[in-house]
């Protein structure tokens, strides 16, 4: 069964500092991996996705993530945090080419950005 | 395009009542899913569908029913509401070959 673990339910950084949100996955087949962002009282917005092409994936708002098979990780980074990055971030995994279409989420990381 | 539209946005139910959460998408997406979001638990999959007439259970299906009579609509039915079903419900859809889901804005349900 697939699963996702997000280390750190709350992360706080200073404006301008590096953002690093951790995600580890478990999958018995090659995975598709995603990061979503949720702003308060809104739905989820896709930040970026890994679908077995380049291992370094660039997304919107300056975020990127690197797929590391050996570490079963897909950590999200941004070189310089902005106040507008404050939100909750979810990592998710889906089976590569899976017919079941299930997208399984982690429990989320709430990012706070301090001025 | 409106994307994924969920109605209502807010609902309060009494224990034992039934209701239907509506979800419609205008993108001709084959795949649709329902999730519930609870604090500290992320999003958990309730039911999903890979096309009209085809549905299956997710992680937490008990107490919920779905049907998919058209490509556009994927309603979620609460058969007999319980306080444990107080949550925020999200509907999502995606196109075949594109694994990035599009989410609706959610329905906040309170069962008293």
Image: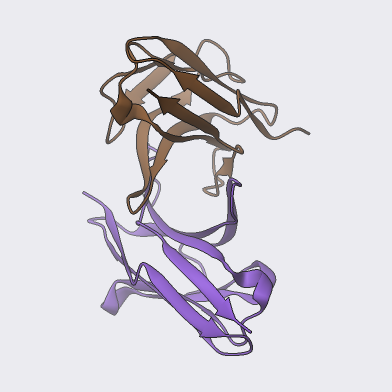
Question: In the rendered image of this protein, does residue A102 appear above or below residue A20?
Answer: above
The picture's colour for chain A is purple
Task: Tell me where residue B69 appears, x and y as whole percent.
Answer: 52, 10
The residue at 54%/38% (across/down) is: B96
**Residue at position x 52%, y 73% in the image:** A112
B97 vs B50, nearest the viewer: B50
> Residue at coordinates 29% horizontally, 19% vertically from top-left?
B63
Number of numbered discs overlaid on the protein picture: 0
Left of A4 or right of it: where is B50?
Answer: right
Residue furthest front as drawn: B112
Q: Which chain is brown?
A: B
Which residue is at the front of the view, A95 or A108? Answer: A108
Q: Position of residue B48 (x, y in %)?
A: 41, 29
Residue A50 appears in the figure = no
Quadrant of the frame with the N terminus of chain B? top right
In this view of the protein, can residue A107 be seen by the observer? yes
Query: Is residue B105 or residue B13 the one in the foreground?
Result: B13
Task: State which quadrant residue B93 falls in.
Answer: top right
Left or right of B68 in this view: B39: left
Res B43 quadrant in image = top left
Q: In which quarter of the image is residue B71?
A: top right
Residue A33 x, y percent position in the rendering:
43, 60
Most extreme residue toward the right is B1
Residue depicted at x 29% and y 72%: A72
């Amino acid at each position: 069964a697939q699963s996702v673990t997000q280390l750190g339910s709350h992360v706080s950084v200073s404006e301008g500092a590096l953002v690093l949100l951790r995600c580890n996955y478990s999958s018995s087949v090659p995975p598709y991996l995603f990061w979503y962002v949720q702003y308060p009282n809104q739905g989820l917005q896709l930040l970026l996705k890994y679908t077995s092409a380049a291992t370094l994936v660039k997304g919107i708002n300056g975020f990127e993530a690197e797929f590391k098979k050996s570490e079963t990780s897909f950590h999200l980074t941004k070189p310089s945090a902005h106040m507008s990055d404050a939100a909750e971030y979810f990592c998710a995994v889906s089976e590569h080419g899976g017919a079941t279409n299930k997208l399984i989420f982690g429990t989320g990381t709430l990012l706070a950005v301090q001025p | 395009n409106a994307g994924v539209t969920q109605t209502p946005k807010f609902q309060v139910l009494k224990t034992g009542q039934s209701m239907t959460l509506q979800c419609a998408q205008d993108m001709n997406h084959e795949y649709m899913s329902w999730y519930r979001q609870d604090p500290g638990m992320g999003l958990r999959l309730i039911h999903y569908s890979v096309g009209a007439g085809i549905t299956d259970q997710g992680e937490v299906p008990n107490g919920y029913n779905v049907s998919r009579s058209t490509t556009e609509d994927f309603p979620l039915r609460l058969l007999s509401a319980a306080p444990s079903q107080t949550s925020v419900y999200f509907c999502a859809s995606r196109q075949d070959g594109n694994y990035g889901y599009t989410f609706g804005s959610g329905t906040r349900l309170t069962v008293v």
